[in-house]
Amino acid sequence: MSGMEQAGYRKPPRSGRFKKGQSGNPRGRPKNRRREIPYDAVLGQMVTVRENGKEKRVTAAEAFLLQLTQKGLAGDSAAARASLDAIEKAQASHGDSGTPIKKIIVTSIGSGADAIIGKLGIALLKYPTDKARVRWELNPWIVEAALRRLGEKRLSLEEQREVFAHTRTPQKVKWPQWWEVRE
């Protein structure tokens, strides 16, 4: 078998090997394929946004601009600059006639303090879909920490009732000795 080469593991038969000077991919990579980010496809997708307790469908671009604008109004200067730049670009591309392109009503869509209160475990949002009953309930650990910060200061009975009513599981709180409200 000296004249014949054996085919086997990691030794393909000569007929199946690439010929010298011949590309393994003769047609090559298609031109302009996946070189640019598909902004239109991504930003044009429809998403659902809850506004004033009602859901509405908007493009991802519109939802992004709403959130940027809201963060800007809440004091995030980088978001404010970005949303103003986007508004200026939109006006420039549509020709600024002195009238706004679209009336935007800004409401909470998950940014600012509300967005981090739940993430940090400070409170739990109860009844988020019921506009009449929606509220934050404080977790016991944050109530205890806040009461420790008071030092010698005492809360009035009315303030105690308010704290007790907005505590998620008041029976788990280690209330200070001076605390009077228990139900």
Image (spheres, grey):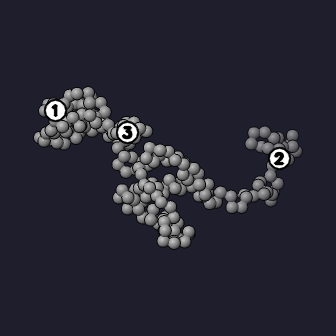
Residue kind at label 1, given as amino acid type: Trp
The location of residue 166, given as percent across then percent down, is 28, 36
Task: Point out residue 59 in the picture as x, y percentages from the top left corner.
Answer: 55, 53
> Which of label 2 and label 1 is nearer to you?
1
Residue 119 falls in which quadrant of the image?
top left
* Mark 3–mark 2 distance (CA, rounded to whole Å): 73 Å
Q: Quadrant of the N terminus?
A: top right
Q: Earlier in the sequence, mark 2 or mark 1?
A: 2
Q: Residue furthest left?
A: 152
**Where residue 71 sits: x, y (%)?**
40, 56
Provide the secondary structure element on which disc 1 rests.
loop
In which image quadrant can residue 171 be found?
top left
Q: Residue at x 24, y 34 (%)?
A: 164
Q: Mark 3 or mark 2: which comes first in sequence? A: 2
Q: Residue at x 49, y 47 (%)?
A: 49
Q: Does residue 121 appear in the picture of this structure?
A: no
CB under 8 Å between callouts 2 and 1? no
Of the residues shown, which amino acid type is indicated by label 3? Ala
Circle count: 3
Distance from disc 2 to disc 1, alpha carbons, whole Å, reads 86 Å
Classify 71 as above or below 56: below
Q: Which residue is mark 3?
A: 132
Q: Position of residue 53 (x, y in %)?
A: 44, 43
Asked if residue 151 lies left or right of residue 1, the reply is: left
Give the quadrant of residue 130.
top left
Report the residue marked by disc 2: 16
Q: Which type of secondary structure does the marked residue at label 3 adopt?
A: loop
